Image (tube, rainbow, N blue to C red):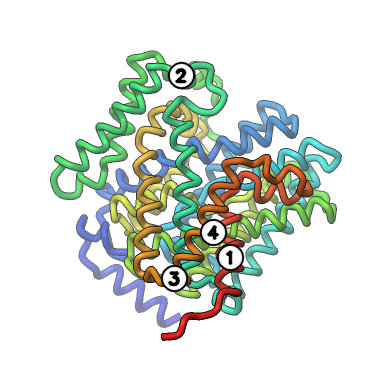
Amino acid sequence: MGKIKENFTKFKNEKSSIDNIYNLNGKVPLLKSIPYGLQHILAMFVANITPVIIVSGACGLSSADTARLIQTAMIIAGIGSLIQMFPIFRIGSKMPIVMGISFTFVSTLCVIGSGDFGYEKMLGAIIVGGIFEGTLGLFAKYWRKIISPVVAACVVTAIGFSLFSVGANSFGGGNGAADFGSWQNWLLGGVTLITCILVNIFAKGHLKQLSVLFGLIVGYIVAICLGKVDFSQLSEVGIVSAPAILPVMPQFDIGAIISVAVIFLVSATETIGDTSALAGAALDREPTDKEISGSLACDGFISAISGLFGCMPITSFSQNIGLVAMTKVVNRFTIATGAVVMIIAGFFPIIGAVLATLPEAVLGGCTIMMFGSIVVSGIQMLTKCGFSERNITIASLSLSVGVGFTLVPDIFKNFPDIVQSIFAQNCVAVVFVLAIVLNLVLPKEKS
């Protein structure tokens, strides 16, 4: 208790400065920190609500239930992000990790929610699976040794590669868009990207680190001029509302629980990779056991809470790791302002509805460069590991099989459904498993 009081007094007496945006724990003026936090939310907002819309549709939920879950998703993502940055006991990494609804679970949850299991058993599986991952995270120091620096570097590189198609799809207008690849979407994505680059080159001082926010604003204005922003649904949105706990009573089925628990392991590999990428790219060091443990514990336990509110699991968002890697803005208090905006948007649906009008092509224009930053971070981590024959074998084989095989998902068609759902379209999972196996079986090199 004395230590907490000492830290609070130290923070209270610290001088507030905009220069502290590059310091993990520095004090930044509130009004000056909000734009930096806001660009993190704009970078992930559409991706945060999209999985909810997909799974809700597969489960046959009404439009009112879907709107309620979108609202819940914003609040849960904001709370999860705050806990990551300001841990509760051992839950949270104390790093600027932004959390959001995970895409990793979409295919599995669609099958469970729309099949014989149903929405209630899907929620039961999320709650149990979240507790499983959270507990696993608390004991990370006992098993993390198998994840050597070269394994972490391979996973980070794979995360960047896996996001390239996400950025390209957004640039074209979004999956399923009727005008995908149209000249308007090319124009929006191009204007946004060029704005980000120009601000990054010519802006002075700290404005340089707001290049993504400027790109989003300029792209959004152009989209309005082109008639690509739909404001029609804003009139139907309420002013204030709160999410409901246990909107339906969860049911627990062993088959659904096992399927979802396996995907939680895949999600854990991505979280380890994201935490490693953030530490390496922004803090220039390896993550500690405590940071990995807290990051995974937050991932799991907050996902379980999300299930109690009828929503999907959350995880760290790689696009925000890319934003941190590009801007070097790592201040927890600065990025936390974005998490607070997310929570407020959850209680005031009109805010979320306005943010949801951001066109996919505009988002794609600013994320395409951020995702490339993650790959570069992975390569830098590989460089620090050294290009010994053993490391080259681990990196080259895990990346070529992981990325290559998932580009041809039919190669897994003769495997059981559970294997297909985990590995067929998730190169991060394949790279992680193969890199660990190679790291364990290849003989250590003699010094």
Q: Does residue 86 appear anywhere in the picture?
A: no
The answer to the question of whether label 4 and label 2 lie on touching residues, with beta carbons closer than 8 A, is no
Mark 1 or mark 3, earlier in chain: 1
Residue 48: image x %, image y %? 53, 41
Mark 4 or mark 2, earlier in chain: 2
Which residue position is annotated with label 3? 389
Crowding around mark 2 (Cα neighbors within 10 Å: few <14, some 14 to 19, many 20+) is: few
Residue 200: image x %, image y %? 21, 42
Q: Does residue 65 appear anywhere in the picture?
A: yes
Name of the residue lying farthest toward the bottom: 447
Amino acid at dot 1: Ala
Name which quarter of the figure residue 189 lies in.
top left
Which residue position is annotated with label 1? 297
Mark 3 or mark 2, earlier in chain: 2
Amino acid at dot 3: Glu
The answer to the question of whether label 4 and label 3 lie on touching residues, with beta carbons closer than 8 A, is no
Please state if 12 lies on the left or on the right of 338 as rendered: left
Separation (CA) of disc 4 from disc 2: 46 Å
Please state if 399 lies on the left or on the right of 5 as rendered: right
Mark nearest the camera among 2 and 1 is 1
Q: Nearer the viewer, residue 179 or 157?
A: 157
Residue at 63 percent of width and 54 percent of height: 303
Residue 44, placed above or below residue 187: below
Amino acid at dot 2: Phe
Residue 94: image x %, image y %? 43, 66
Residue at 38 percent of width and 39 percent of height: 368
Local SS, label 3: helix
Which residue position is annotated with label 2? 231
Amino acid at dot 4: Ser
Separation (CA) of disc 1 from disc 3: 35 Å
Which residue position is annotated with label 4? 398
